[in-house]
Amino acid sequence: MKARIPNQGPTGGNMMKKLQEMQANMEAVQAELAVAEYSASAGGGAVDVTVNGSHEIKAIHIKPEVMDPEEPDMLEDLLLAALNEAMRKADETAEREMGKITGGLQGIPGMGGLF
């Protein structure tokens, strides 16, 4: 359901137009961010992970020398570190790019649910 905003003269219509443009820009950026890929490595490149902006794991590369059957915990730790770093990169990029569009409107009471 869309909210009806009463006609508030020329400035009210201009504000609505700006909000609609912002919403369109946000949707475009969100679509771009969802498919963008973010990579991270751990253990000096022993494990490389790539995720997309939707937090789907797209690739994992493990150097054979870290696949020690005697130390599975080490490989698990490297995977966790690389995955968490890649996800953090995706989140930080999304936050930064959306902040460019919203220009700080997220902090306005009542506007948080819109962004």
Image: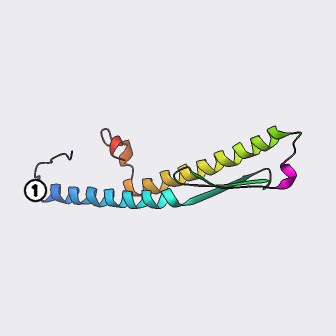
Examine the rendered structure and indicate whether residue 111 appears above or below residue 94: above
Q: For this rendering, which residue is in front, 114 or 72?
A: 72
Q: Is residue 61 magenta?
A: yes
Taking the spot 27% from the left edge, 55% from the top edge, the residue there is 19
Mark 1 sits on what residue?
9
In this rendering, position of residue 83 left or right of residue 16: right
In this rendering, position of residue 2 left or right of residue 63: left
The magenta segment is: 60-67
Examine the rendered structure and indicate whether residue 20 appears above or below residue 107: below
Q: Looking at the picture, how far across and down is residue 8, in whole percent?
A: 11, 52
Q: For this rendering, which residue is in front, 112 or 69?
A: 69
Q: Secondary structure at mark 1?
A: helix
Q: Looking at the picture, how far across and down is residue 98, in whole percent?
A: 43, 54
In this rendering, position of residue 5 left or right of residue 18: left
Q: Quadrant of residue 107?
A: top left
Residue flagged by tag 1: what amino acid is it? Gly
Q: Looking at the picture, how far across and down is residue 76, in whole percent?
A: 76, 41
Q: Crowding at label 1, few (<14), some or many (≥20) Cα neighbours within 10 Å?
A: few
How many tags in the picture? 1
Q: How is the image coloured?
A: rainbow
Q: Given the current orientation, which residue lies at the most extreme right position?
A: 70
Q: Quadrant of residue 21?
A: bottom left
Name the image quarter holding the N terminus: top left
Taking the spot 47% from the left edge, 57% from the top edge, the residue there is 97
Taking the spot 82% from the left edge, 40% from the top edge, the residue there is 72
